[in-house]
Image: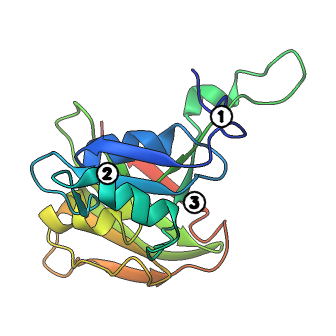
Amino acid sequence: DGRDDLTDRIDFIVCLGGDGTLLYASLLFQQSVPPVMAFHLGSLGFLTPFQFINFQEQVTNVLEGHAALTLRSRLRCVIVRKSDNLKVESSGAKKLTNILVLNEVVIDRGPSPYLSNIDLFLDGKHITSVQGDGLIVSTPTGSTAYAVAAGASMIHPSVPAIMVTPICPHSLNELSDLTASGSEDTLDEIIEKSDS
């Protein structure tokens, strides 16, 4: 799929577009991401702080070291489907979808007309059950996207946290939860049960 072929060959990225372009650039690097300088050519631009008008001067300033670096956390998403439990590769290992994302991971009901029942676990302990259209698990970067549209708060990129936001919950007391991040396996299980 072309990802990680570039990891050892690229030291700096200049991104022209909107937030989606920057998110795609991040997705291409499934290990470490080189520094990204993002120029705003899109509609919103939460992640693209540089204006394109005087791009040459701005690029020169950054390359000369006259810029602040903002580190952003990513989520590791491992997708295991019921059918994956039966599929085993010739090596004897299960093939899983494993991807690092900058914004968010969304678990939703898809085309089903039924509500999803989702159990959320943190470090092996049950935190909550959500009945609704789904759940958004976002980084501080992702808190400005789908999560805020679903009623969550925005989180500054330097805050080490993970935001968990229900999508149209079938409850009056379900609000976003802010969870401190500290390990790669902070949210180790999200189990979705279908009512179909």
Mark 3 or mark 1, which is nearer to you? 1
- Quadrant containing the C terminus is top left
Q: Given the image, on which type of amino acid does mark 3 rest? A: Glu
Q: Are marks 3 and 1 in contact (CB under 8 Å)?
A: no
Q: Which residue is mark 3?
A: 189
- 185 lies left or right of 16: right
Pick out the residue farthest to the right: 91
- Give the image quarter of residue 139: bottom left
What residue is drawn where x is 61% and y is 71%?
Answer: 186
Which mark sits nearer the N-terminus, 3 or 1? 1
Q: Which residue is mark 1?
A: 4
Where residue 6 sits in the image (x, y, percent)?
64, 33
What residue is drawn where x is 39% and y is 56%?
Answer: 59
The 10 Å Cα crowd at callout 1, few under 14, some 14 to 19, many 20 or more, is some
Q: Is residue 75 visible?
A: yes
Depth check: give the residue in front, 48 or 129. 48
Depth check: give the residue in front, 44 or 120. 44
What residue is drawn where x is 46% and y is 82%?
Answer: 179
* CA separation in Å, label 3 and label 2: 46 Å
Q: Which residue is mark 2?
A: 56
Q: Given the image, on which type of amino acid does mark 2 rest? A: Gln
* CA separation in Å, label 1 and label 2: 28 Å
Where residue 157 sits in the image (x, y, percent)?
39, 76
